[in-house]
């Protein structure tokens, strides 16, 4: 079973930034689900937040992509006090490993609404 969720405030129009978080979960929930829900809720209140897409397989491997207007908005989110707690707990108990990548999206296209 693959869990997938999308929360977008509106269609994205390039250019914008994507924060790509790939992680292998450690066994057990240990409060992870509640914190993950809170981070999605909190991120949506941050300046420059555009949306999020997330998928996780039964094996615990997940990819979450959050979208932002600017690199400054991403830096502001990274320093949020609640987010700092989540980052610390992630390193201590929720993730066996992870990678974070930041990319500038200059074009996007798709069906049915193609752009750029």
Image (tube, helix red, strand yellow):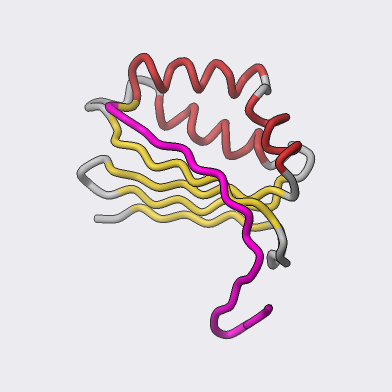
Residue appearing at x 68%, y 23% in the figure: 80
Q: Is residue 57 left or right of residue 70?
A: left
On the image, the x and y values in percent for residue 101 come to: 49, 42
Q: Is residue 115 left or right of residue 60?
A: right
**Residue most extreme to the right:** 47
Q: Is 104 inside the magenta-drawn segment?
A: yes
Q: Is 94 inside the magenta-drawn segment?
A: no
Residue appearing at x 51%, y 49% in the figure: 65
Classify 83 as above or below 25: above
On the image, the x and y values in percent for residue 15 come to: 72, 61
On the image, the x and y values in percent for residue 4 come to: 41, 55
Point out the stretch of residues depicted in magenta: 96-116
Residue appearing at x 40%, y 27% in the figure: 32
Q: Is residue 13 left or right of residue 26?
A: right
The number of callouts visible is 0
Residue appearing at x 67%, y 31% in the figure: 77
Write down the quadrant of residue 42 in the picture: top right
Classify 21 as above or below 116: above
Work out whether residue 56 or residue 19 is closer to the camera in this orientation and state it: 19
Work out whether residue 5 or residue 111 is closer to the camera in this orientation and state it: 111
Q: Quadrant of the C terminus?
A: bottom right
Q: Quadrant of the N terminus?
A: bottom left
On the image, the x and y values in percent for residue 46 come to: 74, 37
Write down the quadrant of residue 107 in the picture: bottom right
Work out whether residue 51 or residue 96 is closer to the camera in this orientation and state it: 96
Classify 90 as above or below 42: above
């Amino acid at each position: 079973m693959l869990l997938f969720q999308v929360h977008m405030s509106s269609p994205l129009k390039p250019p914008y930034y994507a924060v790509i978080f790939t992680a292998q979960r450690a066994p057990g929930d240990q409060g992870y689900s509640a914190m993950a829900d809170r981070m999605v809720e909190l991120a949506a209140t941050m300046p420059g937040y555009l949306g999020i897409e997330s998928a996780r397989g039964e094996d615990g491997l997940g990819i979450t992509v959050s979208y932002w207007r600017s690199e400054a908005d991403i830096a502001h989110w990274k320093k949020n006090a609640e987010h700092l707690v989540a980052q610390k707990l992630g390193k201590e108990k929720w993730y066996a490993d992870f990678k974070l990548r930041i990319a500038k999206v200059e074009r996007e296209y798709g069906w049915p609404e193609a752009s750029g």
